[in-house]
Image (cartoon, coloured by chain):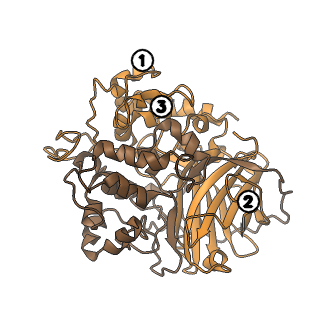
Amino acid sequence: MTKRLFALAACGALSLAFSACSSKSVVHAPPVTGLATPQPTNPVTPTGAYTQIELLSRPAVKEVFEQFNDHKTTNAVEPYAGTPADPLLAEIKGTEDTVRPATGATDYGAALQGILYPNEYAVNLADTSGKAAYLGVETGGATGSMFGGRDPNDDVVDISLGALFGNTLSSLGVIADDGEENNCISKENVTQDPTQMKTTTFPYLASPH
Amino acid sequence: MHYRRILGALTVIAVAVAVFLYTGHPATSSDHQDTYNLATRANTSADITDVFIFPSPSNPNNVVLAMDVSPLIPKGMGTTFFFDPTLMWQFKIAHGSTQPEDQVIQFGVTGTGASQIITMYGPGAPHEVGTANTFIAPAGSFQYNVATQLNNGVKVFAGPRADPFYFDLFAFFSFLGDRNYSTHTSQTDPGPETGGPLYNGDNVGVPAAAAPSYDKTANPAQPTFNGFTAGTTAGAGSALGNYACSTNPATNTLAQVAGGFDVLSFVVEVPKTLLTNGFTSQSIHVWATANSSTGS
């Protein structure tokens, strides 16, 4: 329900707030002459089972909320496993409560549990904007588009910090302003280096340093 | 090849001055090196650092999925890092809901060194839902570090790329030192987090040299990133107190330190129709996993 509220509450007035968080311009890499052809045959496919040892989706969620030792547990479960198999769900609220304790009916920890769990990217393939935007589905497009997903240039850290410790959620109308925003950790004052930016040609990620 | 050992040595040598100005630790990162076991594996390609999903910049009918692994490859060494043939990497997709996964794209690797061959499997229905998985039907195979178009039109790449993640790691570790794997002596060592979230504990299990920067007595819980203008404070309503935010210069760690760091990337560009045909919803949820044939 929180996700729905979050999406419905998104408004154009927030475009300025997110302008610093949206994708940077594309770097124009030299054109490639073409792609190689595949191998003539495939190696023999292994038949045994492979056990999950690592899991990742949204950036900064596990890193901010989970105690380090719990990563091994959460790496080995489905992102939708829930309590008690997945400690992440409880830790979202536990860590958030340390920075901004619930005040009356205003409970940021609970709101973030609804938005960030299950820890998966939401993507709308029907969107024709041609632009990904981290948390775009969850915010009704307030972060740049309704495609969602994540562009390599997205400022995912500032988007996340604003939601967790800043006033993003209250600006979107998802939750009342609790007055507990912490300016020192609601943004990080870092911009992407040109050597890291997305290119226009496959594989789109910049060449190694 | 003992990647971790090489990486550790080179990282310490190359960035020692910059890193020790801040932390007194080798450089590590956020979900880069997110468990002790993944960070200390002989081959670090099980460590997923970032996942991306975006419309193709060159074809509006396509979508690109990318997964970065093997964090903190030093500048100029990208082509000396390779994938672990005992692993399976997966994009897992759920259509119209957050669970369960009903489609997967998988990658497996054979061989060693620059002659490695990567095979893409799918997109297709998973043989199993959950955390123990087997490979589905292959779509095609291609060479390490060579952008390739498979016979079904899917574009694939697996090899070194610049790490696109931008983040002030040093500032983050200044108040969440627990997230630095090197403050732990094993996967079960609780490290600095014993005092609770955002508190850096009493340095139980932390090397003495690290104590000053992570000691909660010396550094009470006043978390701050860097780069704020003088006079900026946490705010009157901050539950942690209304303290001054740091005016120290912010650092884009993965680009500005030691000439920048690289990762190994899996990139696949697929027609959207391969992800939507046979499904009633074009709304998908996506996550990535690394699975091991050895269980660790």
Q: Is residue A7 visible?
A: yes
Residue B269: image quadrant is bottom right
- Judging from the image, what secondary structure is the residue with disc 1 in? helix
Q: Mark 3, mark 1: which one is toward the viewer?
A: 1
Q: Rounded to the nearest whole Å, what is the CA distance between mark 1 and mark 2?
A: 47 Å
Residue A204 in the figure: left or right of residue A33:
left
The numbered mark, 3 or 2, whose residue comes first in the sequence reads 3
**Residue B255 in view (yes/no):** no
Name the amino acid type tagged 2.
Glu
- Amino acid at pointer 1: Ala
Question: Mark 1 packing: few (<14 Cα in 10 Å), some, or many (20+)?
Answer: few
Q: Chain of mark 2?
A: B
Place of residue B26 in the rendered image (x, y in percent of width and height, measured from the top left): 47, 31
| SS at circle 3 | loop
x and y, in percent, of residue B12 in the image: 50, 30
Labels 3 and 1 positioned on one and the same chain:
yes
Of B253 and B63, the residue lying toward us:
B63
Q: Mark number for residue B26?
A: 3
